Amino acid sequence: MSERDVDARVEELIRGLRRMAAGLLEAAAEHPDAVRARELSAAARVLTNGVLARLDGEAVEDSPAHRSEPEVQDTVLPANNAASESGTALDELVELYLPDYARRLDKDPVMFDPDLPYERWNSLHRVRYGRGTPFDNAPLWNDAVPSRGKAVVRGMTSKAEVLRRLHHSYVIRRDLDSPEGELAVQVLEGCKAIRRSRAIVDGDFVDESDLELKLEALQWRALVIAAGRNEHARAQLLTRLRQLEVLAAAVLELDTAFRQRNSNPSLGARIAGAAHGVKTVLRHWPPKIEGAVTESGHTTP
C-alpha cells in the first residue's frame, strides 16, 4: 500500500470517528437514562478531545504543552474526563463565559414569564424601570394574593397593585433564598454561558432564536419550581440541570474546536461534526430523563 493510500485510509477512519462522536452525542440527547446519557456524552468528549485531538496534531491532556497552556478564550481548557462524567461541561462554559459580576442576581425581578402578553409585560417593564424599588415589597410566589389576575389599567393602577395583579408573572430574588433557589440560579448561569459561547455568538451554526426560546422556557420552569418550593422541587431542578448538561456537552465540543480554528485550519471537519451534534441535540431537547420526578409528583418510567 502506497503512502497516499495509507493517508486516504487514515482520513476515512478519522471521518468515521467524527461520525461516531456525533452519534454518541445524539444518543446521549435521546437516551432516557440520565446516568447513561452522561456516560455517552463523556465518551464523545473523550473521543473528540483525546483521540481526534491527537490525530489532528493538537496537544492532549497528558502532554506537557497542554498542561502549561494558558486558559484564555482562544485556547482549549484541559478536558477532565473524570469530571466530565459528573457533568462539568456546564461548569466549563460558565467559567469561560460568565464573569463574576454576571453571576450576581442583584436586580428584581429575576425574570418575567416569557409567554406574557405584551400588555402585561409592558406593565411590569414600566414598574421595573420606574422610580423607586417596588419589587422590594412585591409578594412572594407562595403568598396569597386575592387580586391576582385582575386587569391592569395604565395610569390608574398603582405600582404595588400592578405587582399584586400580575403575581405569578415574575419571580423575584427573595423567592430564590433557598437551596432550591441556588439550583435555579445554576440553571440561569448555565443558560447565560451557553448563549454567550463563541460558537453560538460568532459561529452561526444554530438558529439562535430557537435556542433562545428553549433556554427561556427551561429557565422559567426552573425559577417557578424553586419559588414554589414543593416537596419535589429539588429533584425536579436536578432534572433541569441534567437536561441542560446534555446541551452544554454538545455546545462545549463545538466551542472548543471553534476557538481553535485560527491556529489549526484542519479543524473544519471536526467543527462540522460538532455543529451537527449540537443541531441534533437541539432537535430533541430537552430530553426526557428516566426516573425524573415530574411537576405533578410522578416519576417518569
Image (cartoon, helix red, strand yellow):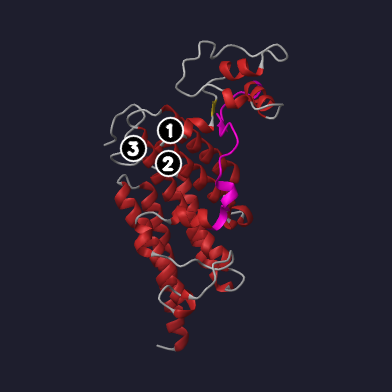
206 relative position to 45: left or right: right
Q: Amino acid at mark 3?
A: Ala
Please give the residue where the numbered disc 2 appears in the rendered image: 183
Query: Percent from the top left, x then y, of residue 264?
Result: 57, 73
The relative height of residue 110 versus residue 89 in the rendered view (above or below) is above
Whether label 2 touches label 1, CB < 8 Å: yes
Q: Earlier in the sequence, mark 2 or mark 3?
A: 2
Q: Residue at (31%, 38%) from the top-left corner?
A: 292
Identify the mark at residue 53; answer none if there is no mark.
none
Please give the residue where the numbered disc 1 appears in the rendered image: 226
Query: Percent from the top left, x then y, of residue 161?
Result: 61, 15
Q: Amino acid at mark 2?
A: Leu
- Neighbour tally class for label 2: few under 14, some 14-19, many 20 plus, Cα within 10 Å: many
The relative height of residue 19 versus residue 139 in the rendered view (above or below) is below
Which element type, helix, strand or loop, lies under badge 2? helix
Query: Percent from the top left, x then y, of residue 80?
Result: 40, 65
Which element type, helix, strand or loop, lies under badge 3? helix
Region in magenta: 96-119
Q: Is residue 57 visible?
A: no
127 relative position to 288: left or right: right
Q: Amino acid at mark 1?
A: Ala
Residue 16, by quadrant, is bottom left
The relative height of residue 49 versus residue 170 in the rendered view (above or below) is below
Query: Percent from the top left, x then y, of residue 8?
Result: 46, 79
Q: Earlier in the sequence, mark 1 or mark 3?
A: 1
